[in-house]
Image: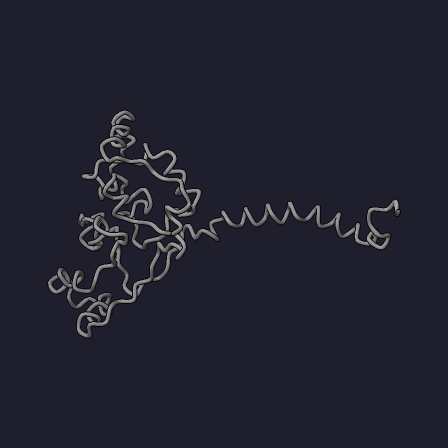
Amino acid sequence: MSRFLFPRWTNALLPFVLVAGAITPLYAAFVVAYGFSPKTIDVGYQPVQPVPYSHALHVGRLGLDCRYCHTTVDRSAFAAVPPTQTCMNCHTQIRPDSAKLEVIRTSYETGMPVEWVKVHKLPDYSYFNHSAHVNRGVGCVECHGRIDQMDVVYRYSPMAMGWCLECHREPVDRLRPVSQITNLAWDQRIEMTREERESLIKLYHINPSENCSTCHR
């Protein structure tokens, strides 16, 4: 019976094994760090839109409610992109000849939709229901930031799994009365005591799931 566990020729592999043993942890650390980097999760992503629409003007200065344009946000899984008719409700009278609105006018005349570039897009393997969150006191600002201060919308939140789980595990500080959902300047951590925020958990029957199947269906 041989006293060697492995054939002698395997000794030649020893340097490669040692190198692999040193590199593997570094490689794993790099993959994890890269996976959580802004480059990967696209925080700050700010695409150029076909029409220079300013939320800072329309929402911040003029006071449009988010639901005027995103009409399904409290009724369905998706926050609808406004059709051209929504824009023309105002712009048939307000600056109807502006060069900035040429794409809007063409869309209105031809019936072809404006090709807006989606800023907040989840992977196909992730499911998120806007109405389930909005109707239980999670305000627009929690995910989208101060949209009312953005001339050009950018991605404010990482929208990574760990970020979502943080809220599911500790929702208290992210809850507000449903009446304040679209009031982006309203801060529940200032306007409400912790006890008042905790009472919303009972009022809205909040019991966030951490099961994988909740988001990965």
Q: Which quadrant would residue 146 be assigned to in this image? A: top left
Q: How far across and how far down the image is residue 183, in percent?
A: 22, 41
Image point (27%, 42%), residue name? 139
Instruction: Name above or below for residue 53 compared with residue 201.
Output: below
Front-most of residues 108 and 164: 164
Which residue appears at 32% of the width and 32% of the height?
172
Q: How many marks?
A: 0
Above or below, 25 relative to 174: below
Indicate left or right for 6 with 80 as reference.
right
How is the model colour-coded? one colour
In the orientation shown, which residue stands out farthest toward the bottom?
Answer: 110
- For this rendering, which residue is in front, 98 or 68? 68
- Residue at left offset 17%, top offset 73%: 109
Q: Position of residue 186 (x, y in %)?
A: 24, 37
Does residue 204 lie above or below 147 as drawn?
above
The residue closer to the viewer here, 156 or 201, is 201
Looking at the rendering, which quadrant does residue 162 occupy?
Answer: top left
At 51% from the left edge and 49% from the top edge, which residue is drawn?
A: 35
Percent of width and height locating residue 117: 33, 62
Residue projecting furthest to the left = 93
- The image shows residue 102 at horizontal and vertical percentages of 22, 70
Return the residue nearer the eye: 20 or 209.
209
